[in-house]
């Protein structure tokens, strides 16, 4: 059984999916997101949560597997200000508070996990980043029930590696599984394995714990609120990210123009 997030108080209107840049997004705030996770754990009803940004929209436009993974997800929250601006351009009512990211909500999440005794399993990153982030999290949240595994394994569903990972997760019995293996690997892995996982809430976070571990420079949070986080990341990791931030948005321009045209010039 899957959780219906429209049951959450205060998000009924926003919980409807909106089509932006050719993909579906759900406008929820950080409190809404945390409430959805809490309700999923409380009821034992599976909830699959993905992030939605321009990189994800680009990958969905080019990959049928990525599109199918997102179509099967229960919630794709906004992790990029262009979605807020585009919605407003189309006459919508999205606000800055509807843009969330793991760096902004992880501390509140782990506070909840420690408070309610949730088990959290983190899948992704290197062994080094997992150890460093685990040590930092347990220093801040000493009663947190936390385990994990790096993301370097054969993700083929029937491979021995993958079955061992699924078995390890299920033996730990997490209330929340956080998957940080980057797009599109993490989304496709979740879609392929969600039926095998005895976990209520599954959330993808990209390189989330690499930031917590200090292995990737953390953008100032004010830059995220202004829609400039991409610039910080581009400057600090130009060789890895220049295609994502300089070329991929150009690929999405026709989709953006078509949505604007249908909204303001429908004839």
Image: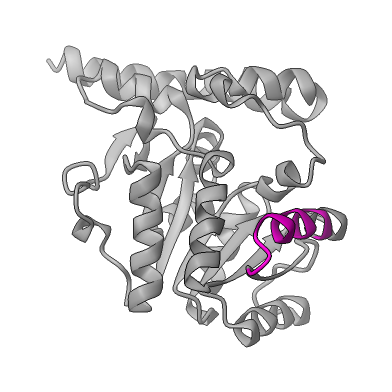
Query: What sort of colour scheme is used for the picture?
Result: one colour
Q: In the image, residue 216 lies at what x, y percent? A: 78, 36
Residue at 36%, 74% (x, y): give it.
42
Does residue 45 show up? no
Q: Nearer the viewer, residue 159 or 16?
A: 16
Q: Is residue 138 above or below residue 103?
A: below
Answer with left or right where residue 133 lies relative to residue 127. Answer: left
Assign the magenta stretch its main secondary structure: helix
Which quadrant, please, contains the C terminus? Answer: top left
Does residue 183 show up? yes
Task: Please report the bounds of the magenta region as a residue range.
Answer: 131-143
> Is residue 57 on the magenta stretch?
no
Q: In the image, residue 171 lies at what x, y percent? A: 64, 87
Q: In the image, residue 35 lies at what x, y percent? A: 35, 57
Q: Quadrant of residue 165?
A: bottom right
Q: Is residue 107 above or below residue 253?
A: below
Q: Is residue 165 above or below residue 262?
A: below
């Amino acid at each position: 059984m899957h959780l219906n997030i429209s049951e959450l108080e205060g998000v009924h209107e926003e919980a409807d999916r909106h089509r932006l840049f050719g993909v579906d997004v759900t406008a929820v705030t950080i409190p809404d997101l945390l409430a959805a996770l809490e309700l999923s754990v409380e009821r034992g009803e599976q909830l699959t949560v993905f992030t939605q940004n321009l990189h994800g929209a680009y990958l969905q436009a080019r990959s049928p597997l990525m599109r199918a993974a997102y179509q099967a997800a229960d919630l794709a929250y906004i992790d990029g200000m262009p979605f807020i601006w585009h919605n407003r351009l189309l006459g919508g009512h999205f606000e800055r508070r509807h843009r969330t990211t793991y760096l902004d909500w992880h501390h509140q999440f782990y506070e909840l996990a420690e408070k309610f005794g949730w088990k959290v399993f983190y899948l992704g990153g290197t062994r080094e980043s997992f150890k460093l982030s685990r040590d930092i999290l347990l220093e801040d949240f000493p009663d947190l029930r936390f385990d994990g595994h790096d993301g370097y394994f054969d993700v083929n569903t029937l491979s021995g590696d993958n079955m061992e990972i699924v078995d390890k997760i299920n033996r730990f019995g997490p209330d929340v599984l956080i998957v940080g293996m980057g797009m599109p690997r993490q989304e496709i892995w979740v879609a392929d394995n969600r039926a095998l996982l005895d976990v209520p809430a599954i959330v993808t976070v990209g390189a989330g714990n690499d930031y917590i571990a200090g292995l990737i420079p953390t953008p100032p949070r004010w830059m995220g609120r202004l829609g400039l986080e991409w610039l910080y990341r581009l400057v600090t990791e130009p060789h890895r990210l220049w295609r994502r931030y300089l070329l991929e948005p150009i690929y999405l321009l026709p989709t953006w123009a078509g949505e604007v045209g249908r909204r303001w010039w429908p004839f």
